[in-house]
Structure formats: structure tokens, C-alpha cells
Image (cartoon, rainbow, N blue to C red):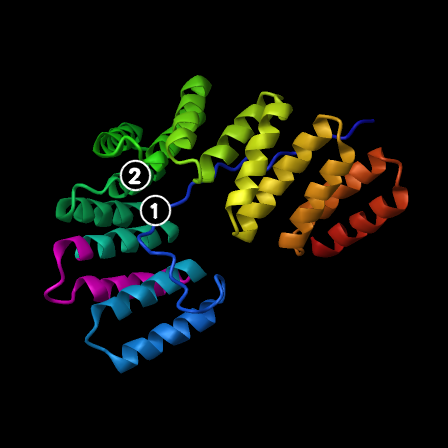
Amino acid sequence: MRRVFVLAVGIATLAVLNAQGQTWGCGERDFKCQLDGRIKALQADPANPENYYNIGIVFHRSGAHTQAVESFSMYIMIPGLKPEFVADGYNNRGISQRALKKPDLAYADYTKAIELNPKKPEYFVNRANSSVDMKRIDDAMKDYGQAIKIDPTYGQAYAQRGVVYSSQGRVDDALRDFAKSIEVSPTYAEPYYNRGTIYSAMKEFAMAIPDYEKYVSLISDPDYLADGYMNLGIAHFYTGHPQKAVDSFTKVIEVQPKRANGYKARAMVYREMKKPDLADADERRAAELK
């Protein structure tokens, strides 16, 4: 009996954090190094507002969102900051509030950011995302539209609006927005993944493959990479390329070795390839990880 895979179809929605990609000489995911460096900078110059801001950035990146909220709260209370800097602080605090499942507080922070600097499309996109969290879809669509009006080349607005269209079953509208996002922001990863999941759901796996391949080439986060390679492997399997499927599922295991689904998927392909010993080994490993 031919086995059936379950797609990792969770729609990627990435918040727009106003950080400049700083790592301050540390590894991209070496958050201890980054935090230690920023704390030393704060101790050396406690009057510099940027130090509070940067500590908040590191906390956010590392998933310590409560501490990020505290850092950004201190930052926005510092007297004498330019309005656009305060707006960034509110925006970033809103992102951490949303990560803490507090969309109402996130919405309020994004609104304050917009009041202080209404020309930043990312603030409208972030507020729209919090509206989606609260099931206020009409409000969200207005904000996505406003972001596009401010900057028609801002790809994230199209990408996030496409996610909403997809959730409503408006597939053609979603595909149109994902295509537009890719056109204006070809290095933005999210729409490739989301368009790929639509093609996969339509069983158009050959069309999904290049989108997943592009997606995994653009990101580094292990969780997102694992989902991308999982869906890529499934697409390869259903287009008759079992070895490419194995290669993709092996990538899932490499980036997330403690997740069982990569082993389970690879075992299923090994059984199709008549390699029971390899399948058995993967199934045992998957069972150990449950």
C-alpha cells in the first residue's frame, strides 16, 4: 500500500522586527554572546538609549519575549528620543507582545508606532497581523492595503494579505498576492513557502518544488528550514523521486535532529524503496523521540 504523507502546511507569518541584523561579532544564534556583549555595553554607557534597544532585540531573537518587553518599555520611556526612534520601540515591543499571545497589547503598541511615524508600512502590516489574531479581518485588510499604498514595493504586505486570502479559501487572490510579493521582494522567503503549500494542497507538486527549494535557500531558522525540507521531500516523493525525498528528509533530521517526523517520513520512503533495514532504524529512532 502506498503511504500518505502529512504536509507541514502551517502558514509562515514572520513579524517585521526593526533590527539591522546586528550580531555584534557573535554567531547568528549565539544569543549568550550577543546578550553578554550588550550588557557590557550598557554597563559602560548606561546613558545610551541604544543599549536598552539592542538588549531588547537580543531577548526577542532568543525567544525571551517577556524580557524583551521590559527592555523596550525602558527604551521608549527615555526622555529626548526622536519620535521615529520611539516608534521603533513600540513596534518591537508589539512584536514581543504578539509572541506572548497578547494581540490586544500588540495592537495598541503598533497603533502608537503608527501615530508617531505613519510612513512605515511595516507598522501597518504588524498591526494587521494582530488584527487577524483577534479575528478582526476587515481591520486587517485595511491595514494591509494602507501599507501597500504607502509603499507598493513592500512585499510583506502582499505576502501577509495572501495568507488571509488563503485562510478564506480565496486561492486565486492568495496566489496573486504571493506572486506580487515575490516580484517586488524576491529575497523574502515567506511567499515561496506559502505558495508552495497551496500548490501541494492542489496536488500540483511539480509546481511546489521550486518554491520550496527557493524558500530553504533564503532562511536559516531551524524550525522553518525543517518545515520547508519536509514539504520539499513530500513533493519529491509524489513526483516520483524517492531518493530526492530521502535527501530532503535527511535535511529535516540534520536541522532538527530531535524531531521525530523527519525519521518517520524517511522511513516511509525507505519502505517504498524496499530498504527495510534503513526503514526499521528510522522508525526505532522516531519511537525514541516521542
Q: Nearer the viewer, residue 225 or 134?
A: 225
Q: Nearer the viewer, residue 133 or 273?
A: 273
**Image mark for residue 125:** 2
Which residues lie in the magenta part?
63-85
Residue 82 falls within the magenta-colored stretch: yes
Q: Which residue lies at the image location 75% right of the left edge and 41% below the top edge?
A: 246
Query: What amino acid type should be assigned to the residue bearing mark 1?
Result: Val
Label 1: state its secondary structure: loop
Quadrant in the picture for the N terminus: top right
Q: Position of residue 78 (x, y in %)?
A: 15, 67
Q: Is residue 31 above or below residue 224?
A: below
Residue underneath mark 1: 16
Side (left or right) of 163 relative to 82: right
**Residue 168 visible somewhere in the drawing:** no
Crowd rating for badge 2 (residues with CA inside 10 Å; few <14, some 14–19, many 20+): many
Q: Position of residue 206 (x, y in %)?
A: 64, 24
Q: Which residue lies at the image location 34% right of the left edge and 46% below the top edge?
A: 16
Q: Is residue 65 above or below residue 275?
A: below
Q: Is residue 123 above or below residue 139?
A: below
